[in-house]
Amino acid sequence: MNQPPLVALVGNPNAGKSALFNALTGARQKVGNYPGVTVERHSGRMALPDGRPIELVDLPGTYSLDPSSPDEAVTRDVLTGAQAGERPPAAIIVVVDASNLDNHLRFALQLIALGRPVVVALNMIDLARRDGLEIDAGKLATALGVPVIETIAVRKRGIDELKAAVATLVGNADRAPPPEPAQADMVTLQRRARAISAEATLSESTGRRISHSIDKLALHPVLGPIILAALMFVMFQAVFAWSETPIGWIEDGMQRLADVTAAALPDGFIRSLLVEGVIAGVGAVIVFLPQILILFFFILLLEASGYMVRAAFLMDRLMARVGLSGRAFIPLLSSFACAVPGIMATRTIEDPKDRLTTILIAPLMTCSARLPVYTLIIAAFIPNRLVGPGIGLQGLVLFVLYIAGIIGALVVALILRSTVTKGGGGGFLMEMPKYQWPRLRDVLIGLWQRAAIFLKRAGSIIAVTTVILWLLASFPAAPAGEKQSEYSFAGRIATGIEVVVRPIGFNHEIAMALLPAMAAREVAVSAIATVYAIDADDEEQMTMALEDRLQGKWSLPTALAFLAWFIFAPQCISTIAVTRRETNGWKWPLFMVSYLFVIAYVAAGATYWTATALGL
């Protein structure tokens, strides 16, 4: 029995392909798996206007013929006739979104280049017109060299015209465009797609014209990265310039709270616990809340405006050079807030080695938990002065620290992709959202959520860890002439750690802070504050700002080495735990912790000895 001709229905994700498939086949559908592949095969019967039956197969949505997943590989193999047990299609229906024409035409050009009979379904034309976009289907057909039919799949409009166009193609190989000898690269295809889209577009809304004009600059191969770097630079300048006043308010409030508590309670265990442990330790972290909120204010603005996706597009080129897929950008971007959701977001990466590499370098992204450490040391040791018009030295140093983390992650990715996770990265394609003004309400809600998360950590993990450290640092009580921070249980543990970290410039107080900081990076600040509060000789020293105490206790090379350590060190138990869960074992978490500690130690040591040699 002769099988009916096979017609493939294909297009980008979210082009309305499934709705069109349902409109063409009705209830005459069946679902199975492709031979040898656990990918669903959706097919259905469709009758042409002349009565001939055909089999319509709905292929998985994809952005190109260069597959990055089993689904996309099936689409390529069916279209090229390489899928086992599947006959090659007699014709191809390409579904494109009329409101996103230039992006969808890129894949259509790849399909037309195969040399098979093709008809383009210009779908969702009603939504395009609603947005002020008028497309000439005739001009588009002339430019592509294939029939173009306007459709509204959800309303079953254009279905009869589409069936008629398919009827003229099936069994008529003369109507197929000649195959192109070599597949054009993606950049060339995109340029052709944009040119064809511009030629076929009769009019568009002012908003679309403005978006295209902005993208000419924002996505420019030279100006784009410069604009991105400038935005980041302004963001880090603002972290210091805008936060000075609210930080002062919080510091004054914590000092008043300490004074009131000290005055209300008699000298003893409870008073010391609250003043030296809870208030001094947790307060030293809470004081950085304004800087964290300023940082996330900029991030939320960039996300809501539609620019963040453009930043991902710009970074994709750089990431591809170190063997990472462009799909890794979003998880790594999430890691700037916290590595835990960033690592969980790697589930969208199909290639296992690509995903593993992204997991292993996610902790190198400078998460918000590092910000209190960075800003404390910068405020204590970096002068608050201008180095150029509107350019503060402190903001510049913070910018350099973030860039150092990014560069470190890229270098590590290149090494990992050449050794333990050897493999090649692939690019990825994305649709650009429209530019829009961020909604103030959404931004404020986002800031409220970040503040709640930070304060919850301060009231739980940081508070508990700080109290435990205070207890260990307070007992046993030191005899006269001995420093409490050295004689106590915590001090004795720190003495053992100090033997290891002394060569890289770390002192006893830093050694005591490193271990509790494994719970959360911010704890390093509260731990240092607690240690100095315990050793304070009088109330004046106890209420002194932490950065003022550090200036008299640490050398500049030690401070710089401490910053270098925190760029790389994996000081967060939650990150280790989620890595273990996502990799189904302890092998890779232990590998991650080991290599990060080695890099942190070497970086801190190199920084300390270089700064010492330079006489800083």
Image (cartoon, rainbow, N blue to C red):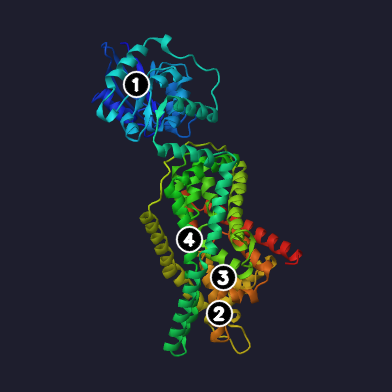
Residue 420 in percent (x, y) is at 59, 44
Mark 4 or 3: the one toward you: 4
Q: Which residue is denoted by mark 2 in the rendering?
A: 544
User: Which is more toward the observer, 545 or 73?
Assistant: 545
Mark 1 or 3: the one toward you: 1
Q: Which residue is denoted by mark 3 in the rendering?
A: 513
Secondary structure of the residue carrying tag 2 is loop
| Residue drawn 44% across the image and 36% down it | 209
**CB under 8 Å between discs 1 and 2:** no
Which amino acid lies under the numbered mark 3 shown in the image of this protein?
Ala
Q: Which residue is denoted by mark 4 in the rendering?
A: 294
Q: Vertically, is 613 above or below 530?
A: above
Report how far apart the C-alphas of labels 4 and 3 lie in the structure: 27 Å
Which amino acid lies under the numbered mark 1 shown in the image of this protein?
Ile
Which amino acid lies under the numbered mark 2 shown in the image of this protein?
Met
Question: Does any portion of residue 421 appear in the rendered image?
Answer: no
Q: Vertically, is 377 above or below 298?
A: below
Task: Determine the residue located farthest toward the left in the rendered image.
Answer: 27
Report how far apart the C-alphas of labels 1 and 4 lie in the structure: 50 Å
